[in-house]
Every structure is written in C-alpha cells, then in structure tokens.
Image (spheres, grey):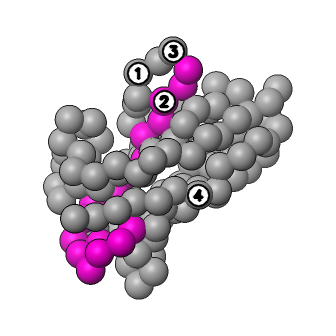
Amino acid sequence: QVQLVESGGGLVQAGGSLRLSCAASGRTFSAYAMGWFRQAPGKEREFVAAISWSGGVTAYADSVKGRFAISRDNAKNTVYLQMDSLKPEDTAVYYCASDKNYRSIRFEAYVDYWGQGTQVTVSS
C-alpha cells in the first residue's frame, strides 16, 4: 500500500511559478514510476508528466513541455513538479500518481495509487 500526499498548490499570477510536492509512504517508493495528472473544472483528468523509478526517464504532455519539470528524490520518498511560466489554462486540481510500470503511468486506468489532489489557480 502506498499513500500519496500532495502539497504546494496555491494562487499565482500568470507567468509565475509553483513547485508541487508529493510525499509517499511505504518502503517501495523507489520501485514505482511516478506521475502528475490534472483536472480542470468541467474537464476530464489529463496526464501532465511522468518519471521513471530511477528518475532517468521523463515524459510530458505537449501542453506543458518546456514549462514544467518533474523530478524525484528517492531518499525522501518525494516527487516534485516545478511549474514555470504558468498560464490561466493551467488552473486545475493536480494529482500525484504511482504505477509500477513507467510505460503505462500516463494512462489513468493503469494508475495504482492516487493522491488527494492540490488546487493550482493561475490568475490572468
């Protein structure tokens, strides 16, 4: 069992930055690929970014490529999402996710564990 707790959300002006954190419980954190999803009001949840168990491989949605960066610290059981050049359309609840298979973590149906979500609001 893995529990995920996100933090770092908030209100920021367009062009600003935020860093989200996701703290994971359990001794097997380093065995899991990790990812971030988001859900805007009235929209379906969508994939944002993923990172392999070692941190050596990452993937991003086209909408955030070049602006967001995912990283992890296995010693701290934590995954991060650095969000720069934020836009109003980035406003959403951001969810942390884990999956034993990096190849499938971008697909919501294959996610093993979810966090409770953290709100990010970008004002124009």
Which residue in the protein does label 1 denote?
44
* Amino acid type of the residue tagged 2 in the rendering: Gln
Q: Earlier in the sequence, mark 2 or mark 4?
A: 4
* Amino acid type of the residue tagged 4 in the rendering: Ser
**Residue 113: x %, y % from top left:** 28, 52
Read off the magenta span. 24-41
Q: Quadrant of the C terminus?
A: top right
Locate residue 113 relative to residue 80 in the image: left or right: left
Image point (64%, 25%), residue name: 89
The magenta stretch spans residue 91: no
Locate residue 88 relative to residue 77 in the image: left or right: right
Image point (29%, 41%), residue name: 106
Q: What crowding class fits label 1: few (fewer than 14 Cα within 10 Å), some (14-19), or many (20 or more)?
A: few
Instruction: Tell me whether circle 3 and circle 4 mark residues in contact (CB < 8 Å).
Output: no
Q: CA distance from mark 3 to mark 4?
A: 23 Å
State the SS at label 2.
strand
State the SS at label 4.
strand
Q: CA distance from mark 3 to mark 1?
A: 7 Å
Q: CA distance from mark 4 to mark 1?
A: 21 Å
Query: Which quadrant would residue 76 be assigned to in this image?
Result: bottom left
